[in-house]
Image (tube, rainbow, N blue to C red):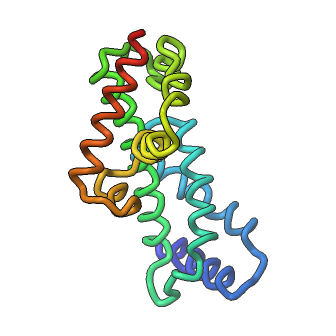
C-alpha cells in the first residue's frame, strides 16, 4: 500500500506543480477511488457518479493539498464524503416520499415520485427562493445548518421554511 501511497503523492505533487499528468493519475487512481466509493454506496451507477465528482473535487481543490501529508488519505476522505452526500441525498428523497405518503416500493425513489406525482410540476409552482431551498436540501443533500448559513438565517427559520415547503408540495401533489 505504501507504493500506491507514494505514487499518489507524486502524482498530486506533479499536478499541483502544473504538470499535465491528470490522465495518468486518472488511470492509476481509478480502481482505488471506485473501490472506496463502492464500499459506501453498494451501487455501481452511483459509484461512477462519485468517481467523476471526486476527480472534479481533486482538480478544484488541488491547491489546498499539502504535499507533506498523505495524498491517499486525502483522496479517501474526499471519496468517502462524496459518497455520504449521495447517501444523504437519497435518504432525503426517501424520507420526503415517506413523509408525504408517496410510494417507496421502487428501487429508484426519485423516478417513482416523478412518475406518480409529477414532483417537477409541483416544484415549478414554488417561488424561486423555495425552489432554491428544495434544491439545496433534497437534490444537493445539504443539511439544514449549512442551508441556514448560506441563506444567512437562523437554523430554526430554515427548518420551519423547509417544513412549510414540504407541506405545500405534499398538498400540491395530492390535487
**Depth check: 95 or 131 in front?**
131
Q: Can residue 20 be seen by looking at this rendering?
A: yes
Determine the residue positioned at 39% across, 31% down. Answer: 93
Indicate left or right for 145 with 58 as reference: left
**Identity of the residue furthest to the right in this view:** 20
**Quarter of image, res 100:** top left
Report whether 159 appears left or right of 6: left
Quadrant for the C terminus in the image: top left
Q: Residue at x 72, y 70 (%)?
A: 22
Single out the residue that lies furthest toward the front.
127
- Which residue shows up at 52% across the image and 43% down it? 128
Quadrant in which residue 170 is drawn = top left
Indicate the quadrant where residue 145 lies. Answer: bottom left
Q: Position of residue 123 (x, y in %)?
A: 50, 30
Q: Nearer the viewer, residue 29 or 95?
A: 95
x%, y% of residue 122?
49, 23
Viewer-proximal residue, 158 or 57? 158
Q: How many marks?
A: 0
Q: Position of residue 34 (x, y in %)?
A: 54, 51
Identify the residue at horizontal 46%, vertical 19% (top origin).
Answer: 113
* 85 up-or-down from 166: above or below: below
Instruction: Single out the residue that lies furthest toward the left.
Output: 156
Measured along the vertical axis of the image, is residue 152 above or below residue 102? below
Residue 139 seen from this side: no
* Residue 102 percent across, percent down from the top left: 36, 15
Amino acid at each position: 500500500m505504501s507504493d500506491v501511497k507514494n505514487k499518489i503523492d507524486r502524482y498530486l505533487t506533479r499536478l499541483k506543480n502544473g504538470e499535465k499528468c491528470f490522465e495518468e493519475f486518472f488511470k492509476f487512481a481509478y480502481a482505488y477511488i471506485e473501490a472506496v466509493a463502492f464500499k459506501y454506496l453498494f451501487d455501481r451507477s452511483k459509484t461512477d457518479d462519485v468517481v467523476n465528482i471526486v476527480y472534479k473535487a481533486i482538480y478544484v481543490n488541488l491547491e489546498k493539498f499539502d504535499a507533506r501529508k498523505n495524498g491517499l488519505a486525502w483522496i479517501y476522505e474526499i471519496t468517502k464524503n462524496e459518497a455520504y452526500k449521495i447517501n444523504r441525498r437519497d435518504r432525503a428523497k426517501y424520507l420526503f416520499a415517506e413523509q408525504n405518503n408517496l410510494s417507496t416500493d421502487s428501487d429508484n425513489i426519485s423516478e417513482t415520485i416523478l412518475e406518480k406525482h409529477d414532483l417537477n410540476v409541483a416544484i415549478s409552482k414554488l417561488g424561486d427562493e423555495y425552489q432554491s431551498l428544495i434544491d439545496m436540501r433534497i437534490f444537493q443533500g445539504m443539511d439544514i445548518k449549512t442551508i441556514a448559513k448560506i441563506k444567512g438565517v437562523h437554523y430554526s427559520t430554515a427548518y420551519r421554511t423547509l417544513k412549510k415547503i414540504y407541506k405545500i408540495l405534499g398538498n400540491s401533489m395530492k390535487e
